[in-house]
Image (spheres, rainbow, N blue to C red):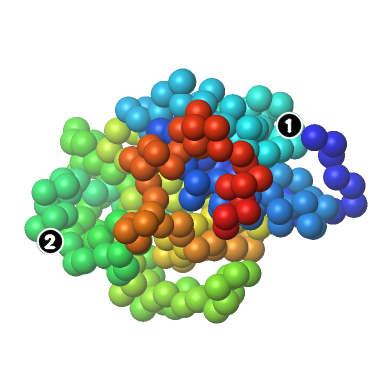
Amino acid sequence: MNLPKNSTYRGRIAPSPTGYLHLGHARTFWTAQQRATAAGGVLLLRNEDLDRARCKPEFVSAMLEDLRWFGFEWHEGPDVGGPFNPYNQSERYSIYREALEKLERAGFIYPCICSRKDLQAAARAPHAEDDNEPIYPGTCRELRKSEVENRKFCWRFRVPDGESVSFTDANLGPQQFVAGKDFGDFVVWRTDDVPAYQLACVVDDAAMQITEAVRGADLLVSTARQRLLYQALSLAIPQFYHCPLMTDEAGVRLAKRHEALSLRRLREAGKVPDDLREAW
């Protein structure tokens, strides 16, 4: 794909190789590609392969193959290189660790020893159906690192309770969430010593100079969390464009368990990308 000229727009598609990509992914990614093309900008592909247990090499190769079959083209990525290598998150660990240490030094995060069972018993319900992280009750807020060094713990970001996080989404308009009410202290580093999605996404989008993040509407609350991380790390905040989620015939949001609607199965069934896009 030829590099565009005279545009500062930088967009990205960021699939995770934990299964086969489905039509919902394709529609959101296609929107990202269209917006990058319309702006005469750059589109990069980032392989979000941090989940050691679920990410598999065969899904990585399938991801690249299926995306190209569907008509995607990118200027930068793990298969084509670019100025912000590496584009595999699994190779960017030291960058995330540096950001974590910066948050720790500034007092934005604290260690948490709560188990999943503890959280289920004590945490309040998530703010929205699409957001799967329950509001943390603050059990470990006063815990010090010296108290947990011989225990398994994660790191949580201390949200400024009562602070309003507002932004204008390029698709859905004005958005507002209240820290401590709509979302609570969130995990930035997991107990298995892996950076959580919120931190990795912010660090990578900033490092790769993304100017607009196009993604699903289920991540609206995550955007509020991430804006706090951008501010804490003194990073430039990109624009956001959240797409409606695709559902199946029963109205259930598409997930990777919907294998019949995966790009791989549709391709094997003889479907044509142009016809699939026309159906949108």
- Residue 43 drawn above or below residue 235: above
59 relative position to 173: left or right:
left
Q: Which residue is mark 1?
A: 82
Point out residue 66 in the picture as x, y percentages from the top left corner. 57, 32
Q: Nearer the viewer, residue 269 or 63?
A: 269
Q: CA distance from mark 2 to mark 1?
A: 46 Å
Quadrant containing the C terminus in the rendered view = bottom right
Camera-nearest label, 2 or 1: 1
Q: Amino acid at mark 2?
A: Ala
Point out residue 14 in the picture as x, y percentages from the top left corner. 55, 42
Point out residue 133 in the picture as x, y percentages from the top left corner. 29, 57
* Marked residue nearer the N-terminal end (2 or 1): 1
Point out residue 56 in the picture as x, y percentages from the top left corner. 41, 24
209 relative position to 21: left or right:
right
Whether residue 33 is visible: yes
Q: Secondary structure at mark 1?
A: loop
221 relative position to 143: left or right:
right
Whether residue 96 is visible: no
The 10 Å Cα crowd at callout 1, few under 14, some 14 to 19, many 20 or more, is some
Q: Label for residue 122?
A: 2
- Residue 84 drawn above or below residue 200: above
Residue at 19% from the left image edge and 67% from the top image edge? 124
Residue at 56% from the left image edge and 51% from the top image edge? 27
Q: Amino acid at mark 1?
A: Gly
- Residue 11 drawn above or below residue 122: above
The 10 Å Cα crowd at callout 2, few under 14, some 14 to 19, many 20 or more, is some
Residue at 27% from the left image edge and 65% from the top image edge? 126
Quadrant containing the N terminus in the rendered view = top right
